[in-house]
Image (tube, rainbow, N blue to C red):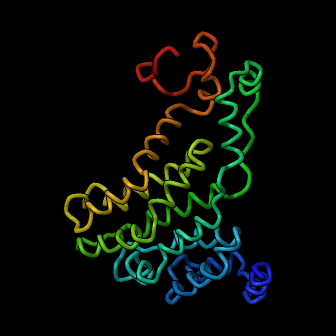
Amino acid sequence: PAAAAAAAAASSRSKPPSEREIFSMASSADGARRAGGAERLLAVGREHAVVDEKVALSFLCALYEAIDPSPASEWSGNKLGAAGAARLVVRVMEAHRPAVDPYMAAVQVMLRSKSVAAVQAMRESDLPPMTGQGFRLQEVACMCLYQLACSDADDLKVSNERRQYVAEAGAFPAIVQAMSVFGTATTQVGKAGCMAIYNICGGSRYRHESPGAEAIREAAAKAGAIEAATEYMTNHAQCSQCRKELLLPRSKRTHRCHVPPSHWRGEE
């Protein structure tokens, strides 16, 4: 019965729009935001982006480019938030996030290996390129949440309303999970996740002034945002080539990156 229901739901869906069609809903040929396009774009997200990874990436990219910091715009975080955009972004993230990224798993096995042969092989060959678009999707989704929390308004109520929509949509757990899955293999997801967490929490300007800011920061902490950011910084304190030589004695390491000697860690 479940399979039959899924098949029926799939057959009832309209044909997924092309990448060009999705972007045209958000902006015109001259790059201007398209009036009346927000609800059309969100409708595509609800119907197709949650089940089709290719459509999901196009949807998120188009949304990210269209979000407007002006509260008066139909593409503002306030109006998009009221229309359910943040909740939809979180749904898309959850629908297309793998439990474990195969690339990251391979890297972790190599880094944790005590086998001299494995470490030597890692040193002598480049790590395999990341495949698929899962990490890119999670990165753009985090940037959408970052943008949805942005505002150029001086009104604290307007600014807080945007961030409240994003926080209440379940953004923090979704961001933390994305950083957990892709945090070792790539810097992009972690960076976008940290930017989103920072902005949703109020950044540097509103963290003490906005109503509700304390509750938002508490929600971030409960979701594990502090640990996720710390782990991200730890994982990427050195460049990829440094990490290849991490298990070797200092005397055997040949790579020196741009980090000055005064900032190097201990001998081992």
Q: Nearer the viewer, residue 199 or 103?
A: 103
**Furthest-left residue in this view:** 209
In the displayed image of the protein, which residue is found farthest to the front? 1
For image coordinates 37% across by 78% down, the residue present is: 78
When the figure is inspected, residue 95 is found, relative to residue 39, above or below; the finding is above
The residue under the point 44% across, 71% down is 169
Vertical relation: 171 (above or below) 155: above
- Horizontal side of residue 213 vs 22, given as left or right: left
- Quarter of the image for residue 254 reads top right
Nearest the eye: 258 or 221: 221
Vertical order, 225 against 23 (above or below):
above
Outermost residue on the top side: it is: 251
> Residue 187, image x and y in percent?
56, 45
Horizontal side, residue 182 vs residue 85: left or right: right
Seen at 19% across and 63% down, the residue is 209
Labels in figure, total: 0
Res 76 quadrant in image: bottom left
As drawn, 153 above or below 219:
below
Quadrant showing the N terminus: bottom right
Q: Position of residue 54 (x, y in %)?
A: 71, 68
Q: Is residue 144 left or right of residue 103?
A: left
Rendered location of residue 136, percent (x, y): 62, 57
Q: In this image, 53 relative to 197: left or right?
A: right
At x 60%, y 78%, the residue is 45
